Amino acid sequence: MELINTLRNNAKVLSKTIVLPESEDVRTLKAAAFLSKESLCKVILIGDEKAVRKNAEKQSISLPDDVQIISFDSFGDSETLVAEFQARRAHKGLTLEQAEKIISTTPLYFAAMLVATGNADGCVAGAVNTTGDVLRAAIQGIGLKKGSDIVSSIFLMHTRDGKTLTYGDCAVVPYPDSTQLASIAIDSAETHKSLIKEDPRVAMLSFSTKGSARHERVDIVTEALKLVQEKRPDLKVDGELQFDAAFMPDIGERKAPGSGVAGKANVYVFPNIDAGNIGYKISERLGGATAIGPIIQGLAKPMNDLSRGCSWEDIVNTACVTAQLQN
């Protein structure tokens, strides 16, 4: 709860506008009501206002008057959204008519374009829609941020001793190449700094530490490390490191003497999704850490995905995280 309270308090100070496109879902309605009542962020719901409020009332949910509910038809500047989306997809042959049909009939794309054009600061979806659908709308509508080669994700891991670590990528990119892995490392470092407000120390993880093993999978990690160092010479990053060398000071000193990261890393970049997904779940289930995520990164503006099994509280927490991600 300590990390969650911190994230909520930080979001309240920022007072960002978050769009929730899945207004037909009762969890989304509960989250919207809570976010507004607690002044954690300003909320936009996508849908017909009368229908949404009637559904909320039927579910015994009191939506505050300051929750904004809009549809494509009621939005005052829909032409700008359509034109911007068409321009972004013109290289794929998308026409204005096709762009309008997509945005007017698909709330995910309408929401993504609200974020892309600055009418909202971020979007949270995925309680109803699949991860693939959410990411497609985000990539096509918002696009990648400058310097990012791929959309990826991190989990925040709040340990029992009060530390907050960042694990990436555990949910999106199955087997990154060295260029993608470097992008994941840089984006994970920036996400960590945005959310935790501390300087990142990035460990490029492997089953090898500093040449203790030779394998093509190790080569991908060492190549990624070189790319990170070239792109971000200001970033504290080291590799390849086994997890114990990255986490334990005494082992880090023994296996990687003189490293500025070994033994004190707070950002852990896994070599693939197998290791990342298994790693965060072991930390959560055996280590007792609290996992918050996945948090999507690499986009020009924030749009985050939910599990379809999420609770309304998960939507609240993800909205608070989204409000704090730097564009």
Image (tube, grey):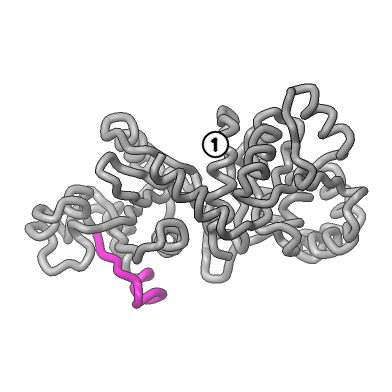
**Nearer-the-camera pick, 181 or 292:** 292
Tell me, yes or no, whether the highlighted magenta stretch contains residue 234. yes
Q: Position of residue 158 (x, y in %)?
A: 35, 44
Residue 180 located left or right of residue 165: right
Q: Residue at x 85, y 59 (%)?
A: 82
Residue 13 located left or right of residue 138: left
Q: Residue at x 75, y 40 (%)?
A: 64
Residue 145 located left or right of residue 165: right
Q: Is residue 84 above or below residue 129?
A: below
**Nearer-the-camera pick, 203 or 193:** 193
Tell me, yes or no, whether the highlighted magenta stretch contains residue 178. no
Does the rendering let one see residue 276? yes
In the image, what residue type sits under mark 1?
Answer: Asp
Q: Position of residue 194 (x, y in %)?
A: 46, 61
**Nearer-the-camera pick, 125 or 174:** 125
Q: Is residue 197 above or below residue 293?
A: below
Q: Which residues are magenta?
A: 227-240
